[in-house]
Amino acid sequence: MADYPEQPQTPTSQIGRNFVGGLATSLGQTRLGGSAFVTSAQTPFGNGTKELLSPDEKKLEKRREWLYSELKDRGETMDFYELLRNLGLPPVDEPFKENAPKLFQSLAECAPFLNKNKMAQTRMEGLTKPQPLGEFEGSDFFKAVNEKAITSYFQRLVDLMHDEAMRHNECSRKAAKHSQLVPEFVYRVADHQAKEVPRSGGHKMDVVFFYARQSMNINNVHIIVEAKLAGVGDPMDEKTFAQIADYQYCLWKKQRTRAFVPVFLVHGSQLDLVVFTRGRWYRIELGPICHERQVVRKQDIQMVQLTMARLYYLITLPPESFGHICDVSQGQQHLCFAEIAGEDSIVAAVTSSREPSADSVNITGYVERFVHPRGRLAHVFKLAFRMQKAILKLSWTPVDRTPEGAIYEVLESAGVEGIPKVFGRGLLKEDVFGFRLEYLILEDCGKQAEDFVTSGSQGRLGSGELYSVVKDVVGQTLRCLAQARVKANILHRDISMGNIMVSCDGAVKIIDWGYAKVIDDASFDASDEATRDRRALLDTIAKRWRYDSAKVLQNEDDHDPLTGTPLYMSIPVLAGAKKRGLADDIESLFYVILHALTKLQTTRDSAVCGFDYHDNKTQVMVRAGCLALEKHFLHFFGVSSCSDDLRRLLCDLRKFLFVSSDGCIASGLVIDPDTPRGAVDLLQPYVDVDTMRLLLRKGEAALTPMKSAVQVRSIEPLDPPASGPLVNNLFRKRAKSTELTESSAEKSEEDPFGTVSKRPKH
């Protein structure tokens, strides 16, 4: 689950703040014509609940409405030379000015002007005769009208610029001036106004740049061009922006090696570049691509020539410099990762190819998953690595957040069990517009816990084998989480259905530590040798992964209330708690087990409301009410029957999480997340001796919500769910729909909202 998106905008000079997002509002939903659009955890196999995508996502109008709402406020203008600095390209005053000062001058002199809805011939100021058309003589764009005239002119211009550049190079070679060569244009340009781009899902893009040596489909699109007859102002109108946002979103979904998506916007006589990154989008004004008036002056020609030079400079950049993480022009079926020699860091290089090599990995086994148009992004592939089943994960993460590979290093150094083996890791891009790219090659850990629990003969609610499986999953998961918290001072923060994996031999592995947090306990004695060694290790890892550990600690604390998968979030986190503890992860595990067991039900009971997610506020109130019903909470979470042993396990977890000497504390956790949980010894029947020692060694310190020694942002807690028509009506309606048995019809118990609920029939 991606974090909820932050709202404050960041100036270009401060690129690097986190603009991650899975949900578009603080309550976890974006409304599209009355339908919710909710994202899921970014794990190799989804979140185990089917991603809650809007049913209108495949409809063009609704999809563009959603994209517009997600991206419209995240743009800013950028200077051309600032763009080059952000791309890490050598600074240039004007492209080709030094080695080819007259390049494209003749084309600029002969360029037409846009006369209302078609191209027309110009004349120089002070002259009566039209300007010669030169290379443009006989071009089809003079016969075209509206946007067709603009796109035809653009394509003809690209061809002529390439021809002139090659003539310049030929002259330079003959004169033995090899230093003056200009790049060769190596892409194919195609018009798709009337014909959809193959495999794009119906997109008809005005002009498309394809890689010359590959088939012309959406997987091999390099740059998109959108043309508008009229000028497009700043800010862009909704229709234009939603259209180009839709095009770039398609490339993010189809091309796994994307670093950003460039779109040329030709509007009227002007040419702009719009760059969509994982955090923001930037609009760069390149200048006039044709003349704005019939009578042109010398300075007009110079401006058009400069725009042509900028355009040619950008379209001749190799893919690894302009939009991709590596050169994909020759094919991208295999990737090869290699550490950069001499670097005291985890920095690595990546290359792609069509054919395999001894050290390459095949990336054709892509795991389809939801792709959000902004924020964190993880591409996951199933593959074979050194004769073993493995997972490749390419992750875009904000530079001010902890890299997942660094978390694995901390866990490994502390000897934490129950995490996947890491075969390879590295930092591929240190900072691309505020996001880093890392790769991880991990062991394939098997099935999701849900699939393992519900498959085979154990998938029967009344069987003893099912209890044994659930007990093993709970015990091994608790061992991993406890070791991570106590030995490594790490909280996972995103325990969900897709992040608990079980191998065929029953070994449980916790994956997807990308949202984990390293806790800097203020209680640690700085003079203690073990503490000094640990902090030295953290500093070393931060240096290797090239991030500011102090800044990352601050940001991870800020994101405590925002991180996780809403369906499995603990009550304090759903309520906006400003700090977290191990108990929050254990509570998430509790919901994962309950949700897995609901899959074994033969029918869906209308009274099941524990997993009916609407928004955080409603969810926390309804869930607190369900958990207050000691004898019937399982029913409201969809578990209508199970063996006595399994029921005892689930009841013990509930008691540990939500019952103290004063009674049920589920509602109290909404107000005070520091409310002490139940007795740790309730977990003893389900964990090994070492895990109990870890939990008891620090007592409540391991379970209590913790934050670093830095101040976190203040977030107002939800109002206490003592009463209210929304909650009362919802809860009564669901309870009323449940039939009562004769033996329990006369019994009742007090619910947390001040109402009386009848005991439901099982």
Image (cartoon, helix red, strand yellow):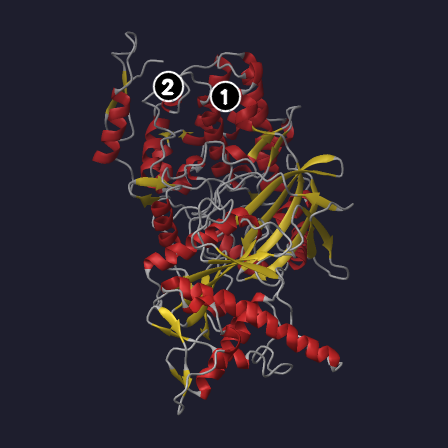
N-term mark: 2 or 1: 2
Q: Amino acid at mark 2?
A: Lys
Q: CA distance from mark 2 to mark 1?
A: 13 Å
Q: Give the residue number, with chain letter if any, for mark 2.
A: 631
- Determine whether the residue tagged by mark 1 lies in a helix, strand or loop: helix
Q: Residues within 10 Å of mark 1 (few under 14, many from 20)?
A: some
Q: Residue at x 36, y 13 (%)?
A: 762
> Quick check: 73 above or below 597?
below
Which one is in front, 532 or 200? Answer: 200
**What residue lies at 42% left-to-right and 16% top-to-bottom?**
602
Residue 376 visible? The answer is no
Amino acid type of disc 1?
Answer: Leu
Question: Which residue is the extreme one toward the front?
Answer: 138
x 59%, y 83%: residue: 101
- The one nearer the camera, 555 or 526, is 555
Secondary structure at numbered mark 2:
loop
Residue 249 visible somewhere in the drawing: yes
Furthest residue toward bottom: 126
Task: Mark 2: give few (<14), some (14-19) or many (20+) Cα within 10 Å.
Answer: few
Residue 508 placed where, x, y %? Answer: 62, 30
Q: How many marks do you count on the picture?
A: 2
Residue 502 is marked as none
Q: Is residue 614 above or below residue 270?
A: above
Where 509 falls versus 150 (above or below)?
A: above
Q: Nearer the viewer, residue 112 or 279?
A: 112
Q: On residue 649, which mark appears?
A: 1
Residue 570: x percent and y percent?
A: 43, 37
Which residue occupies the extreme left position in the image?
A: 725
Residue 172 image offset from top left, x and y in percent: 70, 79
